[in-house]
Image (cartoon, grey):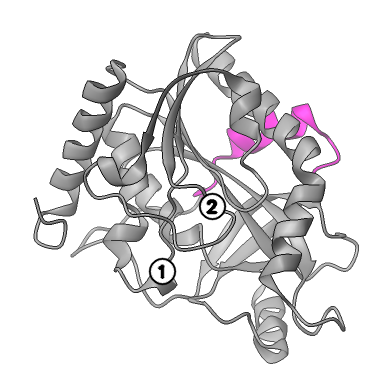
Amino acid sequence: MNPDTTDPYTLARDAADAIAASSGIARHDIALVLGSGWGGAADLLGQEVWRADATSIPGFRAPAVAGHVGTLRSIRIAATGAHALVLGARTHFYEGAGVDAVVHGVRTAAAAGCSTLVLTNGCGGLNTSWAPGTPVLISDHINHTGATPLRGANFVDLTDVYTPRLRQIAHDIDPSLPEGVYMQFSGPSYETPAEVRMAGILGASLVGMSTALEAIAAREAGLDVLGISLVTNHAAGISPEPLSHEEVLQAGKDAGPRIAELLARTVTRITEEAQR
């Protein structure tokens, strides 16, 4: 089957069926997209019951970015018995594969039965009080890619794209969590200082190259969305230091234990509340 000629929703259904057949798990409850620095959270959730190379599932591509794994995993959450689908093969918009490839994991999660999506990323921060290694809840976003996963006259309400109830759960776990507005740029170049100033004028406090398109697709599919950014560096013009991907990876590594525990506790609480 050629993913370039298949309807993307049919392709997502095929992927979900393949995951169910391979894993033996008919339905997943929550999906996680783990960005730079966030990978350790899945290991704290519970027992891994299935793992596969992403390219063995229809529509998924090998990751093109250092720091991203190329696997799909199913984790049985220890406290609740719910199943988390961990999407470790994120396709970024700048890879040029098209928006449908970017949101394929999200659509697959919805087709697999998930009702909640957790999106994480590593990003640049505009707030100088957020040191590298600070997790920030995403309260809203600005999609600056010029693209959308929606087709035709499909008017999806994005008023509460990042579900307030889920943000409150995260605040209950860690009351010190700040919130910010995330602005997705196309990449792959880092933002210029002028673009960062523009982002701040428009109301953004976080800048990066993922998440917004995925969140839109999730809301189209009816999923609740929790977004958490890890500030891996001060954005261009905020910091006098040149930006590098190595800095992003190191900040994620340094913050790994704290953010992994935060995310694991939050996801566990979300599934506990879903079962009440």
**Sequence-earlier tag: 1 or 2:** 2
Residue positioned 62% across, 80% down in the render:
190
Q: Residue at 74% of width from left, 30% of height from top? A: 261
Q: Is residue 9 magenta?
A: no
Classify mark 2: residues with Cα within 10 Å, few (<14), some (14-19) or many (20+).
many
Q: Give the residue displayed 49% in from the left and 60% down from the top.
A: 212
Callout 1: helix, strand or loop? helix
| Real-space Cα separation, disc 1 to disc 2, in angstroms | 15 Å
- Residue 185 against residue 31 in the figure, above or below: below
- Front residue of 276/266: it is 266
| Marking on residue 68 | 2
Is residue 184 visible in this depiction of the protein?
yes
Left or right: residue 101 versus residue 185 is left
For the residue marked with disc 1, what is the amino acid? Phe
196 sits left or right of 218 in the view? right
* Image coords of residue 201 (percent x, y): 70, 81
How packed mark 1 is, by other alpha carbons closer than 10 Å (few <14, some 14-19, many 20 or more), is many
* Residue 107 point in image, percent of width and height: 30, 44
Answer whether residue 170 is magenta in the image: yes
Name the side, left or right, on which 83 lies relative to 235: left
In percent of width and height, residue 179 lies at 73, 51
> Furthest-right residue in view?
129
* Residue 149 shows in this picture: no
Q: Which mark is residue 93?
A: 1
